[in-house]
Amino acid sequence: MGKERKRPGYRNVFALGFVSFFTDVSTEMILGILPVYVVQELGATRAALGLMEGIAEMTNYMFRLISGVLSDKLGKRKIFVFIGYAFSGIAKPMFAFAKTWLDALIVRTLDRLGKGIRTSPRDALISQSVREKESGKAFGIHRTLDQLGAVLGPLTAFIIVPLYGTRTLFLISFIPAAIALVILAFFVVDVKIERKPRGILEGASKILRGPFLLLLASLVIFNIGAYNFSFVIVRAQELGIPLAAAPLVYMLINLTHTAVGFPSGIAADKWGREKVLLLSFLMFSLTSFILVFATGSWLDAVLIALLFGVFQGMYDTVSRAVLPRYVPEELRGTAYGVYYIAIGLAFLLGISTVGYLWDAYGRRVAFLYSTATSICSALPLGLLTKQTKT
């Protein structure tokens, strides 16, 4: 009972949620315009766009492993969370000075480096703020607040870009990032754990076994055919959405994402996190299948954005909440780090492959590949669901 009383509870979850809210206002106000900006103004191909996103996310996931292990080793979470948010807040305004897509690649990678530093310790901090059986609800709350910022961000961009231009938007993005740092410094409470002088591989070796390996296998298969919002936005423009309205497509994705995040967490706690994660894989398959054949009007773009948002809301909430049941509390940071590095490597391969296939062989081949890999990823996850039935 004493251990439970030391948990800061949902106040920490909400505080971290508001940190993510303001950070996402900062990030998402530029991401809705960035893919088209990089392709049209900075001269990148779709393959280059995929490579940029893949390298940035790989950097993100690599540092999630490093920071996760270090936070376990030092027995502290908050300091890593603060450094990560500060790094991203400073990096994003640098997009204003990009002259080529390679410049944008460097800035995007620096931004994702900050995200990588903060994410594993933050997720471990969320999971340790509440009881394990409530982790779905906790991550659902955090995800919903996070995505509310992701809705406000693109709307802000839609207003600012016509008035002041894209480069000014990048500079303004620092303001909400600074607010997030203030909330983090004064309202988030650290959850201290026992310091253990273990090596990086020692902690990883204790968790890479049994059901956790099966979970990783499923996620790796899924991500070798995955892509992110950037390809949805590029395709939406091809279907008739004008450049000025690109942030609204991104906002639509985030609105749907927000709407399903918290319910997904509740459903995961009630019916099984593996089952809801499996459903998110199937939703991605449906989105990719529609991308194969959609050749109509902007209404097709709206449908694709809605479906992708449903997938993202379910996946981003439950893929993090499913992990705590498979690893001990003192190894959560390491476990999240291993989890993120595995899917980061797979995602780098996946989004680069999808972009290459789109350029070289056309949209249908690219998204048929994504459809096939997401269906295959459901097989090991289905097996894990049977194993963990209670």
Image (spheres, helix red, strand yellow):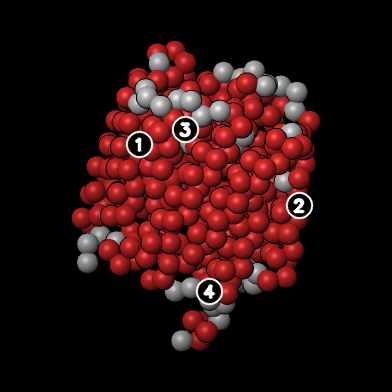
| Mark before the other along the chain sequence, 4 or 1 | 4
Reading the image, the residue beneath label 3 is 232
Using residue 97 as the reference point, say whether residue 7 is left or right of it: left
The local secondary structure at tag 3 comes to: helix
Reading the image, the residue beneath label 1 is 287
Kindly identify the amino acid type of the residue bearing the numbered disc 4: Tyr
In 3D space, how far apart are the residues under numbered discs 1 and 3 (Cα atoms)? 10 Å
Reading the image, the residue beneath label 2 is 175
| Mark before the other along the chain sequence, 3 or 2 | 2
| Mark before the other along the chain sequence, 1 or 2 | 2
| Mark before the other along the chain sequence, 3 or 4 | 4
In 3D space, how far apart are the residues under numbered discs 3 and 4 (Cα atoms)? 34 Å
Q: Residue at x 64, y 27 (%)?
A: 37
In 3D space, how far apart are the residues under numbered discs 2 and 4 (Cα atoms)? 26 Å
Kindly identify the amino acid type of the residue bearing the numbered disc 1: Thr
Residue density around tag 3, few if under 14, some if 14–19, many if 20 or more, within 10 Å: many
The local secondary structure at tag 2 comes to: helix
Using residue 389 as the reference point, say whether residue 10 is left or right of it: right
In 3D space, how far apart are the residues under numbered discs 3 and 2 (Cα atoms)? 28 Å
